[in-house]
Amino acid sequence: GENVEQHPSTLSVQEGDSAVIKCTYSDSASNYFPWYKQELGKRPQLIIDIRSNVGEKKDQRIAVTLNKTAKHFSLHITETQPEDSAVYFCAASRTGKLIFGQGTTLQVKP
Amino acid sequence: DTGVSQDPRHKITKRGQNVTFRCDPISEHNRLYWYRQTLGQGPEFLTYFQNEAQLEKSRLLSDRFSAERPKGSFSTLEIQRTEQGDSAMYLCASSYGQGEGDEQYFGPGTRLTVT
């Protein structure tokens, strides 16, 4: 069935360092890959997304890369700040419904 | 607030009772999704609508769960004969388009506790 694996489950970095979160997906027909940030007690918020016809996308300190052959995609956050601390979820989609990974708790230490 | 809204925000019920949640999507959005999220996990897909048509329902969803979107606007999710395992955050999301690659906007969720 459809599945998305996300690693690591927790990530602790010093402020200013980079953070990388990786996901793999099982459905080779998936064509949309969003990343959501969820702060404690809040709703998931989209931070960046990528479609299957693109290999990389950047938005300021955030970038996402996609390797369709390997069915991998990754989130890169540079120059991390304490306010980046949250749970991050990757997801994959083919028909619109999102299949989410298990989440990564990112802690940025000041 | 023109975002996705959900009501109630919290619901405590006893096992065996029925509960109903409401979701109001962003007004022009034609797609509406329901997800369930338990502590420490990613949201899990339940079902979705395009306008008033229910297009897909998760195989994980038992017959105790039913959802409607009668006029293609708000949606309701009903759980009959609740069980303790139904305790979770129920999230609604909406989007505009045909579904592929459309950004989904999430509501604040309804937290259900079954005692």
Image (cartoon, coloured by chain):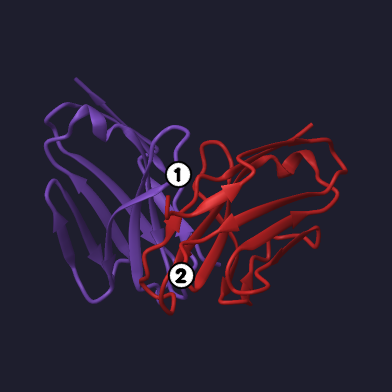
Q: Nearer the viewer, residue A34 or B67?
A: B67
| Chain coloured purple | A
Q: Is residue A9 above or below residue B55?
A: above
Distance from the alpha carbon under mark 1 to that under mark 2: 18 Å
Relative to A102, is B82 on the left or the right? right
Kindly indicate the quadrant of the structure image that contains residue A43.
top left
Relative to B73, is B60 on the left or the right? right
Could you tell me residue B89's position as x and y percent?
60, 43
Residue B67 appearing in the image: yes
Q: Is residue A32 above or below residue A47?
A: below
Give the residue type that dot 2 points to: His
The residue lying at 25 percent from left, 31 percent from top is A83
Could you tell me residue A97's position as x and y percent?
50, 67
Could you tell me residue A9's position as x and y percent?
40, 38
Relative to A12, is B42 on the left or the right? right
The residue lying at 23 percent from left, 27 percent from top is A82
Q: Which mark is residue B29?
A: 2
Task: Kindly identify which chain the residue marked by label 2 belongs to.
Answer: B
Query: Which quarter of the image is occupied by the C terminus of chain B?
Result: top right
Kindly indicate the quadrant of the structure image that contains residue B100.
bottom left
Residue A13 appearing in the image: no
Task: Kindly identify which chain the residue marked by label 1 belongs to.
Answer: A
Chain B colour is: red
